[in-house]
Image: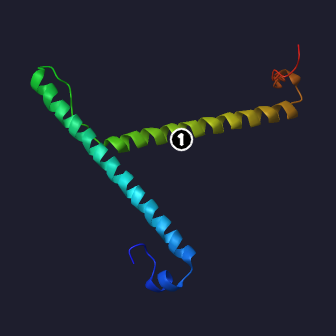
Amino acid sequence: MAIGVSYEDFWHGDPEIVSFAIEVDEIQQRNGIVRNDFLAWNTGRYVMAGVGVVLSQAFSKTSKAKYPAEPLIAAELDEQLAEQKRERELVKAQNDFLAVAAALSRTTPNQEYAVPNVPDGTDAA
């Protein structure tokens, strides 16, 4: 059948199976609509960029407008992924530094190099 349930399950099986299959089908249809809408919107971005370049070059002698050299979405995703990676690396470096500082403060016999206790602001002055 169209929703992914066999004839036997539809007529003689558990009604929960049919109900679940209908919900899954509705979700897949909704996701398909969202995907198609996104593709149409993204196509509009490319059309707008192309028309903008043509009009800019037609009405300006010194136009530097150019059509995008790479896919717009891929570039945006790459930037987001790179930013997330930088943030993870920063957190890891900070955690490594704090671990080393804590280890040095516990094991250093010379108190001159020990990390001082920094108040956390909870003490009443």
Residue 96 location, quadrant: top right
Eyeballing the image, is 43 above or below 30?
Answer: above
Please name the residue that numbered disc 1 is placed on. 85
Is residue 48 left or right of 125 when viewed as pictured?
Answer: left
Residue 112 location, quadrant: top right
Is residue 78 left or right of 54 when viewed as pictured?
Answer: right
The reply to whether residue 81 is visible in this rendering is yes
Colour scheme used in the picture?
rainbow
Say which of 50 and 25 sits in front.
25
Give x and y (percent) for residue 31.
41, 56
Give x and y (percent) for residue 115.
81, 25
Eyeballing the image, is 20 above or below 50?
Answer: below
Quadrant of image for the C terminus: top right
Eyeballing the image, is 2 above or below 108?
Answer: below
Residue 87 location, quadrant: top right
Is residue 31 left or right of 106 when viewed as pictured?
Answer: left
Give x and y (percent) for residue 120.
81, 23
- Sort mark 1 into few (<14), some (14-19) or many (20+) by Cα contacts within 10 Å: few
Count of numbered circles in the view: 1
Say which of 76 and 46 sits in front.
46
Amino acid type at circle 1 is Lys
Say which of 59 and 37 sits in front.
37
Q: Which element is circle 1 on?
A: helix
Give x and y (percent) for residue 88.
59, 40
- Which residue is at a point 32% across and 41% down the rendered structure image? 72
Quadrant of image for the N terminus: bottom left
- Which residue is at a point 54% across and 83% down the rendered structure image? 13
Eyeballing the image, is 19 above or below 72?
Answer: below
The reply to whether residue 69 is visible in this rendering is no
Is residue 52 left or right of 25 when viewed as pictured?
Answer: left
- Which residue is at a point 44% across and 66% down the rendered structure image? 25
